[in-house]
Amino acid sequence: MQAIINIPICPLKSSPAAASLEDEVLFGMEVELTGPAQDGWQPVRTHYRYEGLVPESALVTDPALVERWQAADKRVVLHKHCADVLAEPKVQGAFVEQALPMGARLEIAGPAADGWQPVRLPDGCTGYVCASFLDTLWESPCAQGYALRQALTDTARLYAGTQYRWGGKSPAGIDCSGLCSMAYMLCGINIYRDAAIQPGFPIHEIPLSEMREGDLIYFPGHIAMYLGDGLYIHSTGRAGDNGVTINSFFAEHPLYRADLPSQITAVGSFF
């Protein structure tokens, strides 16, 4: 049975008592119910095959609403870190939903007019969002070749300055694998959520000498995306950085980070 996330950022945990997040599932994403709910927590599997428990209250499970959502024309919040859904097509409108993060999904409920896009939420509520905040929800790679590499790096850069959050996956806070997996997801590719190359996902190992823009760099317990010219973007909890930052592999570069170049364990590529 399928369900839809109906809160802006939904925590996914290994157990209700777990102090830390395993992941976050964003508004409008589909999940599969994998067992009965217990004490208000529902076991689920995400569309990118990550499993855990989410609050039962965060889900829309009505079969008719889920079926409508699956068939709907949807867009994704992309051009702002967050977006409000308002009851009227004006900035003074009452909130229908607040602060949907980049990566949230909304159903298109009619043609845009005067810069406002009518939308429908998973629970059937309707409202308006600034049309310029939304973009294509890609279900397959958004481009090919170098254009796809450029799209991946451009998308990762949208999270620049975001604070580090263990298990996070939004501009409110993001971890290293959250950054890389969201950049790929927003370009239409589901990769493994953690900092590893996993069989069954579309990333394969390549030689370090063949690394190009958009490829992934693996370290012990850490992952980054290569930007080209010796630069890479990653989300790091290191004191002084504490978030999404760009570093260089070159010692002469002002963004050089000395501890990581010698720790590379693998390079992964979709291409």
Image (spheres, rainbow, N blue to C red):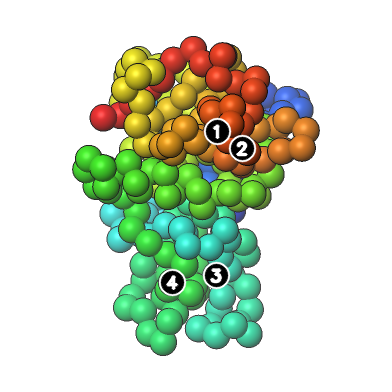
Disc on the earlier residue, 4 or 3: 3
Q: CA distance from mark 3 to mark 2?
A: 39 Å
| Residue 85 marker | 3
Q: CA distance from mark 3 to mark 1?
A: 39 Å
Q: Quadrant of residue 219?
A: top right
Q: Secondary structure at mark 3?
A: strand
Q: Given contact means CB atoms under 8 Å apart, are the residues at marks 1 and 2 in contact? A: yes
Q: Residue at x 51, y 16 (%)?
A: 264
Q: Quadrant of residue 254?
A: top right
* Amino acid type, label 3: Val
Sort mark 4 into few (<14), some (14-19) or many (20+) by Cα contacts within 10 Å: few
Name the mark nearer the viewer: 4 or 3: 4
Name the mark nearer the viewer: 3 or 2: 2
Q: Residue at x 33, y 38 (%)?
A: 189
Q: Given contact means CB atoms under 8 Å apart, are the residues at marks 4 and 3 in contact? A: no
Q: Residue at x 31, y 22 (%)?
A: 210
Q: Secondary structure at mark 1?
A: strand
Q: Secondary structure at mark 4?
A: helix
Name the mark nearer the viewer: 3 or 1: 1
